[in-house]
Amino acid sequence: MLQEYEFSQHYVVTGAAFLSLVGEPPLDLDDVAGMTISTPATGPVYSYLQANRPDVTLLGVAGYVDALQAVIDGRADATGLNYDVGYNLAEQLFPGQFGRPGDMFMEVGWRCQAQGHGAHLPGSLRCRTGYDPQ
């Protein structure tokens, strides 16, 4: 049986950005042509860049720590990670080695869902996130 869900509007918007070593200028989507970008291979940034930036070499890694380490090791020019989490993790693990991220290039919105047509939010709701191309 097909189930119907009602969704709220996005109530938190975050997204992905590029992080590079301190001293490098912040990067946005127009700056990365010809670069090698590390990002988790199973994450939404990998798929997004694969579809939208074929002129970028993607280095798919296991997770955020590996993506940051690839930049430190010189295997990648920059990493594409969640704007907030990526920078905060970089500061924890590699203090002072990464500059501030550039502008977000892929927005991801958090919203709530409730089962059933005409369901009243915030009744029985679940919150989720995901890349929403709309």
Image: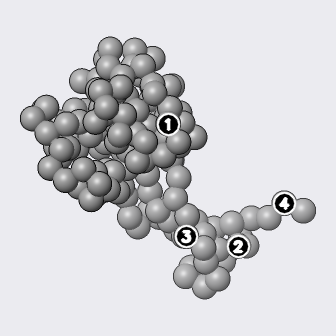
Mark drawn on residue 130: none
Distance from the alpha carbon under mark 3 to that under mark 2: 12 Å
Which residue is more in the foreground, 119 or 73? 73
| Horizontal relation, residue 43 to residue 3: left or right | left
The mark that comes first in sequence, 2 or 4, is: 4
At numbered mark 2, what does the secondary structure look like: helix, strand or loop? strand
Tell me whether circle 3 and circle 2 mark residues in contact (CB < 8 Å): no
Q: Amino acid at mark 2?
A: Gln
Where does label 2 land, which residue? 115
| Horizontal relation, residue 14 to residue 1: left or right | left
The mark that comes first in sequence, 1 or 4, is: 4
Q: Position of residue 44 (x, y in %)?
A: 51, 42
Distance from the alpha carbon under mark 3 to that under mark 4: 20 Å
At numbered mark 1, what does the secondary structure look like: helix, strand or loop? strand
Q: Position of residue 57 (x, y in %)?
A: 42, 19
The mark that comes first in sequence, 2 or 1, is: 1
Residue 74 showing in the rendered view: yes
Which residue is more in the foreground, 79 or 111? 79
Q: Position of residue 95 (x, y in %)?
A: 19, 53
Task: Give the residue displayed 48% in from the left and 46% down from the top.
Answer: 63
Q: Amino acid at mark 4?
A: Leu
Tell me whether circle 1 and circle 4 mark residues in contact (CB < 8 Å): no
Say few, some or many: other residues with alpha carbon within 10 Å of mark 3 (under 14 / 14 to 19 / 20 or more): few
